[in-house]
Amino acid sequence: MLLMSSPASPGRGLHAPASAPAEDARTALGRTRRERLRELLFSSAEGLSLDDIEKILETRRSVVLSDLEHLRLSFRHQDATLLMVPPSCTQCGFTFRLDVPKAPSRCPVCKSRSLSEPIFKAETGAA
C-alpha cells in the first residue's frame, strides 16, 4: 500500500507534524512555563497584569489563566499565597469578587467593556 501526501499539504511526509510545534514545555534553562511564572510572581514587587504575563511567557491568555489556577491550588500545599487585585469597571466602579483567576470581558452592571485588568502577585508566608 502506497501512502501519498494530500494536495492540501504538499511535500509533507508520512511522519511530519500536522502543524508547527507548540512552545516547548522547557526553556533553554530547563524550567517549565509554570516554574517561570512562579518566579515572575514572586519577583514582582507590584504584581503583573495578564497582558504582562502573556508577553513575558509568550503564550495565550487561556494558558496563563490555567497556569495561575494551577499555582493557586499548589500554593495551598506550600507556605505561599497567590494574591490578586480584582478587575473593576472603569465606567461604574463595580469591583469583581473572584476566588479563581479570571479575566472578565464586560461589567455585569453597566455592560461596559472598559475594565481594569486583574493584577497577580505571589507571597510566601501569607495566609
Image: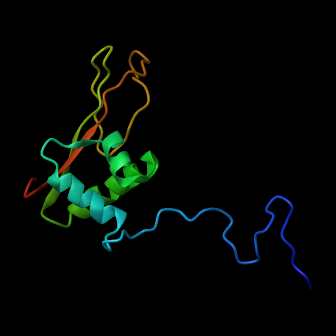
Q: Name above or below for residue 27 compared with residue 103.
A: below
Task: Give whichever of 41, 80 is nearer the camera.
Answer: 41
- What residue is at 16 percent from the left and 49 percent from the top? 44
- What residue is at 35 percent from the left and 25 percent from the top? 115
Relative image position of residue 102 (x, y in whole percent): 37, 41
Which of the 4 quarters of the picture holds residue 95?
A: top left
Question: Which quadrant is the N terminus positioned in?
Answer: bottom right
Relative image position of residue 51 (x, y in whole percent): 35, 40
Q: Quick check: 7 left or right of 35?
A: right
Q: Quick check: 27 left or right of 8?
A: left
Which of the 4 quarters of the picture holds residue 12?
A: bottom right
- What residue is at 32 percent from the left and 47 percent from the top? 53
Task: Give whichever of 103, 18 is nearer the camera.
Answer: 18
Residue ranking furthest to the right = 1
Residue ranking furthest to the front = 11
Task: Give whichever of 12, 41 is nearer the camera.
Answer: 12
